[in-house]
Image (tube, grey):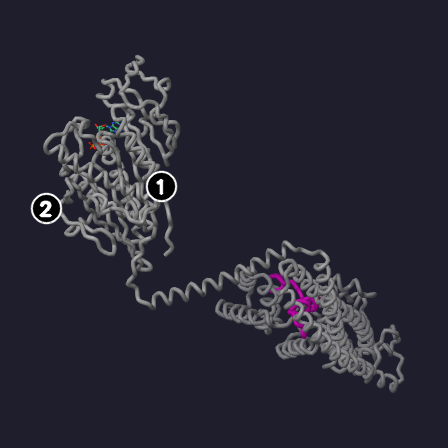
Amino acid sequence: MSAEQTNIKVVVRVRPYNRRELEQNQRQIVKVLDNNTLLFDPDEEDDEFFFQGTKQNYRDITKRLNKKISMDFDRVFDPEATNRQIFEECTSPLVASVLNGYNCSVFVYGATGAGKTFTMLGSDSCPGLTFLTMRELFDKIQAQSSTHKFDVGVSYLEVYNELVMNLLTKTGPLKLQEDSNGVVVSGLVLKPIYSADELLQLLAQGNSNRTQHPTDANAESSRSHAIFQVHIRMTDRKTGTKRTVKLSMIDLAGSERAASTKGIGVRFKEGASINKSLLALGNCINKLADGMKHIPYRDSNLTRILKDSLGGNCRTLMVANVSMSSLTYEDTYNTLKYASRAKKIRTTLKQNVLKSNMPKDFYIKKVTELMAENERLKIKVAQLEKASEATRSYNESELKAWYSKIDAVYASVIKTQEYVIGTQSKIKSMNFREKLKKENIACNKLLERNSVNSEEVLPTSTSVYNQQIGKLEEESIRWRRKLHDANKDLEKLKKEIKESKYVEILKIYEKGKDMEVQYSKQQININHISGINAEFLRDSNKLRKAFNVACGLLQNSYSELKTDVQEKYEQLQHFVKTHAYFGQEDYKKDSDEDLEVPILLKKSNGKRTHKTTESDLPASTSTAKKHRSRRAELTNDFELGLDTMEDTDSDDCGDVFKKPYIKCTIMDETHVLSCATDDECSTNTDHLVNNILSEQIARVPQNKDRVKNALLKSKTFNHHGLLKTVAAGVQKENKKFSPVRVRKSPRSIMVKSLATTASIVKRQAVRTVNSNTNEPLVRINRAASFRVKK
Ligand SMILES: Nc1ncnc2c1ncn2[C@@H]1O[C@H](COP(=O)(O)OP(=O)(O)OP(=O)(O)O)[C@@H](O)[C@H]1O
């Protein structure tokens, strides 16, 4: 542990005149100039002395006058200064030093009656330095008790007539011994204490045991040197490190002249002993101040005890007490001379640390932890330095170079991505067209036969598409490879950015570029979906025209049709009527003409009369099943969205594409009631209820009650049957409208119907040609026709 050299701190306290001095009308021989300087024995004119408001006459005290010696000290306290002020400025900092492991000493020096005991012990109304310092020490000990364990012991000794006495136990004189730790008092047992009050109690007890006798100079003159010591052992609770420190408060007996104390007998002997020890102290101070190697500590017990405080490992404060009265001219001069000498004494300060009894492993672990922590902090510091360097050395041209590099890599990614997804889109479109074309063969034939918009008819050969798809797939593979390379370059670039000093700035730029890539992907997807939708609308338009042609043909040859074909035709009529697909306004905008299906009111050839009603729903159980499977087939066959792209947006687009198929036929209780009263309809009760529920409940759950009420009003249902039917319907509808189910597509039904119609027409046409008849085949009631959109 490194040692620190420091000077003894010397402060001078000038006490006010006492009654005796005032009565004797003495002149002032000490003048406090400022906090650090005093003037000893000032000029006469400077010595204006007033007592009770009257200027006093100068009285020569036969000494050499007007020395006018200016003296500097660490601090000079004038007569106004209080004990607390001295404590706060001088001894309070020592408490902190003690708890940091430094030995500390405070001793008061001065002539008898100069105010040493007043400074050190004070009174009840004005506690002295010992009391204030001890209280402060215990307050700090309390504050640190969570981190340190403190063991405190005190001793209170007096050196009277060269005998060392224990003031706390009143035992016989003790011997001083020297060992490696310095001078120790053999047989001295430290009194353990646990609170400031205990300590002050012991102090008071020791004071009461101290030898005091009145002298001429002081009615309560202390006739011994008192040494109050607090020994503290501090143990760090975490590391187990131990320190022992000592704080000594020493109240010396007053230096005195036999003449001034007028001592005789025992008092004279006391005085001589006091003077002997103080002389020894003066010698030690002189030699220490001169830097001599040999210091005569052994000359007195006082100097032996003060050895540590004067020349050892100790932070020392000396308070020199003086009176400003010329009555103690010589004593004051001597005190100030010694105090000035003492200022030069240097002590060596060392923190007292004892070996801890913690196991070696503990320290090894601790050191390893600290080294790891150190390494971590070093890295952190390096990173921070790098970051601050980056912001400090911000170079615009370097940044620009980075930007253009990033732009180039991202442009390549976006371009190759466009090609990859673009070719994928084209392949999908081609597949879709091919599928449409295959399904539309019947439709084309019909249109060709009637020469309707023959230019819109799709080519019959699918080989053209196959060739194009093949080429596109090859192209797609090529572009996928390029995209793979571009993505690799991008990864590499991202790594470089991470290591770059502009990482903070470039990361933001990189994020923007990533968004550009995403945006471009979305844009292609949208274009693709729009293309497919347009294709579909074109196809639907054509189908509608073909449908009109087919209906015309069927109408013309109605009477020639077989019964089952006639029924199919009627079902088709009904289908067109009930499916809003044809009636939706947005769809109609694309069509050039309305779709009309003739309605047959009567069979002329005695076949059953049929009026098309709502109850003639085409969805008999088997037909409905067929339609459902066909719907699923169509949707599964045509994966139109770009769902093979890496993102999930294609699902949404697919949904958008399916939206035109949403069917919404509104039914209410009127329908139910009319159906329920009809005998013919009542046979299809289950079917009817299911349909009603499917239309009503699925869309508006609250309508369940409306339907139920309507059904209750009908004559056909009893209560039990009704509940069963409603329950079955609800269950079915719940299944039907689960999100995984695809929506109904009338297009597939139309395509199938047209294929059937085309074959019928073909057969019928052959028959008509062969029969050679010019009669119209079907009587048409135009008035009964209706527009299906309604
Ligand atoms: N600064 C002061 N302010 C007021 N009174 C003081 C001051 N200093 C000392 N006195 C008074 O002066 C008298 C003598 O003081 P004190 O007993 O402290 O002197 P001392 O130096 O200890 O003397 P001795 O060496 O004989 O014991 C006491 O009555 C004390 O109250």
User: In this view of the protein, which residue sits in the foreground, 519 or 174?
Assistant: 174
Q: Residue furthest top?
A: 54
The kind of residue tagged 2 is Gly
Q: Is residue 652 magenta?
A: yes
Which image quadrant for residue 131? top left
Asked if 751 appears above or below 104 in the picture, the reply is: below
Label 2 element class:
loop
Q: Secondary structure at mark 1?
A: loop
Does residue 27 appear anywhere in the picture? yes
Per the image, the residue denoted by label 2 is 172
* Left or right: where 683 falls relative to 654: left
Relative vertical location of residue 151 with respect to residue 653 in this rendering, above or below: above
Find out whether residue 12 is within the magenta segment: no
Q: Is residue 506 left or right of residue 372?
A: right
Q: Which quarter of the rendered picture does the C terminus lie within?
A: bottom right
Given residues 399 and 431, the one toward you in this image is 399
Q: Quadrant of residue 229?
A: top left
Q: Residue beneath label 1, please?
A: 344
- Residue 42 appears in which quarter of the rendering? top left
Q: Quadrant of ligand 1?
A: top left
Q: Of the residues shown, which amino acid type is indicated by label 1?
A: Lys
Residue 329 rendering spot, x and y as whole percentages: 27, 26
Horizontal and vertical percent for residue 148?
A: 30, 53
- Residue 611: percent from left, percent from top: 71, 70
Query: Residue drawn at (79%, 68%), measured in percent from left and top?
Result: 595
Between the C-alphas of marks 1 and 2, the distance is: 37 Å
The magenta region covers 643-672
In the depicted view, which residue is nearer to us: 517 or 52?
Answer: 52
Instruction: Provide residue 246's location: percent of width, then percent of height.
Output: 26, 48
Which circle's residue, 1 or 2, is located before the other in the chain? 2
Q: Residue at x 70, y 65 (%)?
A: 517
